[in-house]
Image: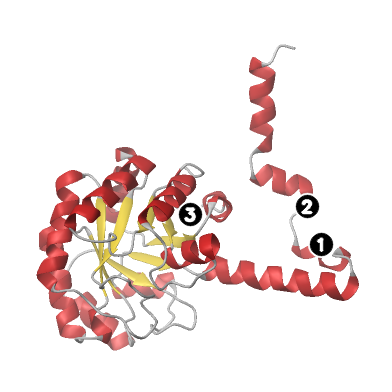
């Protein structure tokens, strides 16, 4: 676990922006890793949708999220940044959540300053806790897992404004957060103001059709962001593809005309690393 955190720290110190696509299960994580990305981001929204078919409104439990983090971390060899919402309660809950994430093999946890039950940062109706309460959560997390990277997220922009968000991020960094994340930034000008505050490593959240302007990794890097997540891109694409297949199958009773948009059986087996299991069997099965 420590090695993955240290690997992520090395990436944070490099000159290249870290592009971390959003993953929500083992398959999506495998696709990201096999595509050559250096890190992956476990999206809380995606986990909620994939596990319980509910949107990101605070309905998943700590145990559900950590189990999924373990499944994902065990399926890839790149650092995993895991969204653990608010930490699921008080500072005691936060400590247990971070400890469980560490055991699961997570390189970094993202903790936000919303009240529980939380909501997706790009949805209305959010409420935030006090700055001091969030500082306590960050310090509590670092006390039990000092090597765990903390990504501190604030949702203050939509509630108390940009200046409070910047002030909170500065305080969260002083408390021990290594990556800072202001969600739902409404304009490029506001993004630049956050960068110019010289807080430290900043994470940008690119949600398609969300509240923040959609910029490329190159544009974000030039602006001064260090990490960019695309939390819902794979889930949106997968849902669209599944809907297309279901429509075609219902209409024609066959998927023959869509095979060009699918992996073949051998290609899928290669993606899943099936060959290594045959190799292990040949090594140890002597019947």
Real-space Cα separation, disc 1 to disc 2, in angstroms: 8 Å
Identify the element where label 2 is drawn: loop
The local crowd at label 2, few if under 14, some if 14 to 19, many if 20 or more residues have their Cα within 10 Å, is few
- Residue position marked by numbered label 2 in the rendering: 264
Which disc is residue 37 wearing?
Answer: 3
Q: Earlier in the sequence, mark 3 or mark 1?
A: 3
Q: Residue furthest top?
A: 286
Residue pictured at 27% horizontal, 45% vertical: 99
Residue 16, picture quadrant = bottom left
Q: Residue 115 sits in which quadrant?
A: bottom left
Of the numbered discs in the image, which one, if any, rests on residue 259?
A: 1
Residue drawn at (12%, 76%) of the image: 167
Residue 11 can be seen, yes or no: no
SS assignment at label 1 = helix
Viewer-proximal residue among 281 and 275: 281
Can residue 154 be seen in the rendering of this structure?
yes
Q: x and y percent of residue 235 in the render?
A: 56, 67
């Amino acid at each position: 676990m420590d090695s993955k955190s240290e690997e992520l720290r090395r990436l944070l110190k490099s000159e290249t922006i870290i592009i971390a696509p959003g993953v929500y299960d083992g398959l999506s994580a495998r696709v990201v890793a096999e595509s050559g990305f250096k890190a992956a981001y476990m999206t809380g929204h995606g986990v909620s949708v994939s596990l319980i078919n509910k949107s990101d409104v605070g309905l998943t439990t700590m145990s559900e999220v950590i189990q999924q983090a373990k499944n994902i971390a065990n399926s890839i060899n790149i650092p995993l940044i895991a969204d653990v919402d608010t930490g699921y309660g008080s500072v005691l809950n936060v400590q247990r959540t971070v400890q469980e994430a560490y055991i699961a093999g997570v390189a970094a946890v993202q903790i936000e300053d919303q009240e529980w039950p939380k909501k997706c940062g790009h949805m209305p109706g959010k409420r935030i806790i006090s700055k001091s309460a969030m500082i306590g959560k960050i310090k509590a997390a670092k006390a039990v897992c000092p090597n765990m990277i903390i990504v501190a997220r604030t949702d203050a922009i939509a509630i108390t404004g940009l200046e409070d968000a910047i002030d909170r991020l500065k305080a969260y960094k002083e408390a021990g957060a290594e990556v800072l994340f202001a969600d739902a930034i409404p304009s490029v000008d506001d993004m630049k103001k956050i960068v110019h505050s010289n807080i430290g490593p900043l994470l940008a959240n690119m949600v398609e059709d969300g509240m923040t302007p959609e910029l490329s990794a190159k544009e974000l890097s030039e602006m001064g962001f260090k990490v960019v997540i695309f939390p819902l891109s794979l889930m949106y694409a997968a849902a669209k593809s599944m809907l297309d297949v279901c429509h075609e199958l219902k209409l024609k009773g066959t998927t023959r005309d869509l095979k060009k948009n699918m992996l073949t059986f051998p290609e899928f087996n290669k993606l899943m690393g099936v060959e290594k299991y045959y190799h292990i069997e040949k090594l140890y099965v002597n019947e």
